[in-house]
Amino acid sequence: MPPNPPAHAPVSPASDAPTQKEDHVTRKIRARYLAPAVLGAAAMALATAGTASGAAAHATHKKSKAVKLTVERPASGTISEAGSSLLYPLWNLWVPGYNAKYPQVTVQTAAGGSGHGISEATAGTIQIGSSDAYLSTSDKQAAKTLENIPLAISAQEIFYHLTGVTAHLKLSGRVLAQIYDGKVTKWNTAAIAKLNPGVSLPSIPIVTLHRSDGSGDTFLFTTYLSDSTKGWASKVGYNTTVTWPSAPGALGETGNSGMLAGCKATPGCIAYVGISYQTQALGDGLVYAQLKNGKGQYIMPSPTTVAAEAAGFAKKTPKTGAQSMIDGKIKNGYPIINYEYAIVSKRQSSSSEAKAVRSLLEWAINPADGNNATYLSQVGFRPLPLRVADNSFGEIKAIK
Amino acid sequence: MTTAQNAAGAAGVPPPAARGPIRTRPGDVLRSVAAALRAGETGAWRWGARVAVLLPFAALVFVVAVLAVKAYPAVRLNGGSFFTHSAWKIGSTYAQTVKTDGIAHPLGSSYGAWPMIAGTLQTSAIAVVIALPISIGCAFALTERLPRFLSRPLGFAIELLAGVPSVVLGLWGVLTFGPALSKTVYPFIATHLPNVPVFSFFKGTVGHGEGLLTGGLVLTLMIVPIITATTADLFRQVPTLPKEGGEALGMTDFEVANKITLRWVRSGIIGATVLGLGRALGETMALVLTVGAIFKVAPNVYSPMTTIAAAIATQLDSALTDGTGFSVASLAEIALVLAVMSVLVNLAARWIVHRTSRLGGPVGRAA
């Protein structure tokens, strides 16, 4: 459930004095979380009075770990961000909102793919690299100061271009692997028709679209395929760049927008696109599929199903934030969701630059600011669970 | 003797004739200072010229050396199969890195550059084969057949085409040219060619505009101005006497053009073609946009594929996500292959020019 909307509109010009603003935000957080938490703790203590003292101790131990999500006020600075095209539309919404409060920081955003974001952040040419994929083992070995900070929860959808088919086709990971492997080449093949009785599929060839740039979307899609079929896992595997098997007529596109443009121009195409492009895709006449999850159900992507899947992973997510949320065995959960990561180095070039970066990221994960429904609902994202937001806050504080 | 006289003597200028008390005139001072400067200037000029001459060569050696050093780990591990295998696999960077022969790389990485090399050769071949007749005909028309009021603006227009940035041509190719061709010309060719095995490369699925033929045609547009301009200059240098003599002997216009004019400048045309071929081999941005990015040898002439330059441009970001640096080393290896290919093409062209300018020159032409 989205938190209460803030008292001030996110894009209104800042009129309060800076210190007042900070206290105002902190006070809101405190008002929202501390009071019910204290009441809850008191209630729990009363309820467990007489039982083992361990339970009460556990309750108070939990309470002492609650983190206040604050937003620092930065000095002036310039931050460069580049990377994931999935997160890019949200950055374009966040930056004006952030600048409304803190106009002294200039933020430059760019797309380019998650691989680009990771490599640029490793090289140090940008401060924030956006990625749908967490850092790989070799990335971490190459640059030991990088951390991946979850910012929001996004999802990926499978779009197809079939004139005359308006139904949301049911597709499973196994069938998708067969399609991208070139084993299923026409839309009316038995494998697809079996899952979709009653839908008349045209007998046109399937044109598979994949990302030719280093893409977090490729990482998510290939993880889903690897989890569904052992053949894919051993032959292709999962990564931001993979060697795609030869499917007839396969096309490589750059960026999520490239995938949409290619799919719109190609009847019979199938493409994996991030949820932030859903409005554009639907406007282009594309339809998204229902995907089979770990429980064997066919789930439509929607805020409820994404939230259900995310809730199942909230406790499992480690402090580093690196957690794959693909294909969890969660009832009514949409199988392809992920954390959107900011790849940032713990060592910034100057302390004022570090403060600007911390300020922007803290603003982004704050439920009253960046993680608010006013921003996230425009791109179909979900806010971070509180526990994960606390972890992210700790990671942000480590940036010096 | 004054210093002026000393300097003058040193520079070989005769001292001013002595007339009464020796007085240094301003003109003498200027002359001797200029002489002294010239003596030093020669040294500075010579040395500056030597450095300038060596600079391009040094740059070439530096580029090739840096590439070779960067590519060394990949050269050692990839071996000869680099040129024959078809898979460009970065490996699983999310698993542990392994060491082969002391070189760290992700598990499962294997690099084969055959599709890229084949793609480069295919696109360049298509471009040169289509551009050569067009350019020679164009240059001939401009210099020998068209009236002045037409040849001047047309020649200017062709030079303007040479100035169009390759990224602009690539964008036009992928948004307009390619799709238009795939809806009209490609289906016509694919359906109307006879069903003979020789033509099977030109039949089949026509695609949507991004592919080998579209890339080749955009490359053609890029190299036609180069070859045309050089060939037109060559045609202008052919002396009129042999041509008029041929006409007088009763040769037709076409025979004069073929046997006299063209043969006179044959080696020069080869040189011009190599200039165009050099541009085609290394062309990056136009091909990145028009050729698709599929790492397989094109099964037919309309399918998406990749070339060396396009692959390096599109794969660099992905290669940088490999923390071991092995992927970047493989890219450096294929870049080295392209550099060597260009140098070899240039050398071969020089050899051919050397051969053709000696043998079989037309009558009357000094060898």
Image (spheres, coloured by chain):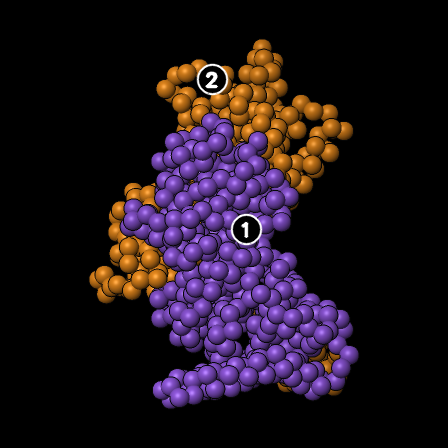
Q: Position of residue B45 (x, y in %)?
A: 56, 66
Q: Quadrant of the N terminus of chain B?
A: bottom right
**Chain letter of disc 1 in the image:** A
- Is residue A381 shown above or below A272? below
Label 2: which residue? B193
Query: Along the line of sight, which residue is nearer the eye, B233 or A292?
Result: A292
Q: Quadrant of residue B360?
A: top left
Query: At x 42% / y 33%, what residue is drawn?
Result: A193
Residue B156 in view of the camera: yes
* Rendering colour (chain B): orange
Going 49% across and 80% down the picture, which residue do you hit?
A394
Chain drawn in purple: A
Tell me where residue B38 appears, x and y as whole percent.
Answer: 61, 70
Q: Chain of mark 2?
A: B
Asked whether, in this view, residue A31 is left or right of residue B270, the answer is right
Snapshot quadrant of residue A189: top left
**Rendering quarter of residue B305:** top left
Q: Is residue A177 left or right of residue B49?
A: left
Q: Amino acid at mark 1?
A: Asn
SS at mark 2 in the image: loop
**Residue A182 vs residue B216: left or right?**
left
Which residue type carries mark 2?
Leu
Callout 1: helix, strand or loop?
A: helix
Q: In the image shown, does A74 or A97 lie closer to the viewer?
A: A97
Neighbourhood count class around disc 1 (C-alpha, 10 Å): few under 14, some 14–19, many 20 upward: many
Q: CA distance from mark 2 to mark 1?
A: 38 Å
Front residue of A327/A62: it is A62
Identify the residue position indicated by label 1 in the image: A256
